[in-house]
Image: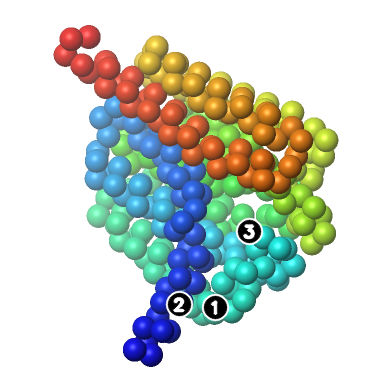
Amino acid sequence: MVWKAFLKPKLFAYARLLRFNMMGGMLLLWPSMWALWLASRGHPDYVWVLIFAVGAILMHSAGCILNDYADRHFDARVARTKARPLVVGSVGAAEAFCLLAMLCLICFLMVLPRLTALFSACMALAVAVAASYPFAKRFFPLPQAWLGLAFGLSAPMAYAAETSAAPLEAWVLVCANIFWAMAYDTEYAMADRADDIKIGIRSSAITLGRYDVLAVMCCYGAAFLLTGWVGLGAGLGGVFLAFLALAFLFAARHYRLIQDREGESCLRAFTENNQVGMVIFLGIALDYLWRDWPLV
């Protein structure tokens, strides 16, 4: 029974390190799902759908390991993060890197039978950007845009998987995701602004100062305009536009949540972005489904 007493807290610590209970993986998932449906004009290869869905969760967890390792000394000085596994020692650095290697190996093995030169290049670029993100916070004044680039590069990967090409619309989706991430991760950073200033971490909330709320809303607007441009260019119509308008209403509600810059309200706005991404995906998928319906 001694091993059970050891194993349970260790597994709990691993789960906390991998953030399996958090929504960051969903924010990585939705852009790739948008791109898979748009690239395939509503008929994605469902093996790729499964690969991207599992990959989003695993690669988000891998990113969390890198981020926590890079920030372990900073996290110890912040109330919200001082109990993270690498800070308190419930997971050691060697264990963390073993988990990281395992996650990366699983993802590589999933795509290995379907690798192409273009997909490999897009994947290598995405991994390089994602791996550098934890360190970008040391010097880059808008690291949230760097995160958006890391997440958004799933779009050309999806196009490469479905069409063996990475057309302009894929890169417009990358830009849309940069603006979307700037919006939602600035909301997150607004909740941590005081601690980030104290420990010397850069963030868009600090850089933008009193213009942070305005910038968040402008970034939402740019993200929706670019996504709408790609959707209309792909032949989507009324169903897509209706859901895009609904997603915009979700995002517009965040103005009330973040205008006072109160920590819990800003975090609530951040978490609601899962619904924003999901609603946009539903608009894309249902518009294609509507067009394929026999009676239409």
The three-letter code of the residue at mark 2 reads: Lys
> How much space separates mark 3 and mark 1, taking CA atoms?
21 Å
The image shows residue 186 at horizontal and vertical percentages of 68, 41
Q: Earlier in the sequence, mark 2 or mark 1?
A: 2
- Kind of element beneath mark 3: helix
Q: Report if residue 269 is visible in the image.
A: yes
Up-down relation of residue 290 to residue 8 (above or below):
above
Up-down relation of residue 15 to residue 53 (above or below):
below
Q: Earlier in the sequence, mark 2 or mark 3?
A: 2
Q: Residue at x 62, y 69 (%)?
A: 83
Q: Residue at x 79, y 62 (%)?
A: 199
Per the rendering, the mark at residue 90 is 1
The image shows residue 135 at horizontal and vertical percentages of 67, 59
Q: How is the image coloured?
A: rainbow
Looking at the image, the residue that sits furthest to the bottom is 2
Callout 2: 10 Å neighbours few (<14), some, many (20+)? some
Q: Report if residue 144 is visible in the image.
A: no
The image shows residue 217 at horizontal and vertical percentages of 67, 28
- Reading the image, the residue beneath label 2 is 10
Q: Residue at x 61, y 54 (%)?
A: 133
The three-letter code of the residue at mark 1 reads: Ser
- Reading the image, the residue beneath label 3 is 134
> How much space separates mark 2 and mark 1, taking CA atoms?
7 Å
Judge from the rendering whether residue 183 lies leftward or rightward of residue 23; answer left or right. Answer: right
The image shows residue 34 at horizontal and vertical percentages of 40, 33
The three-letter code of the residue at mark 3 reads: Pro
Q: Do the residues bearing badges 2 and 1 touch, measured as CB atoms within 8 Å? A: yes
Judge from the rendering whether residue 237 lies leftward or rightward of residue 109; answer left or right. Answer: right
Front tag of 3 and 1: 1
Callout 3: 10 Å neighbours few (<14), some, many (20+)? many
Quarter of the image with the C terminus is top left
Judge from the rendering whether residue 158 lies leftward or rightward of residue 251; answer left or right. Answer: left
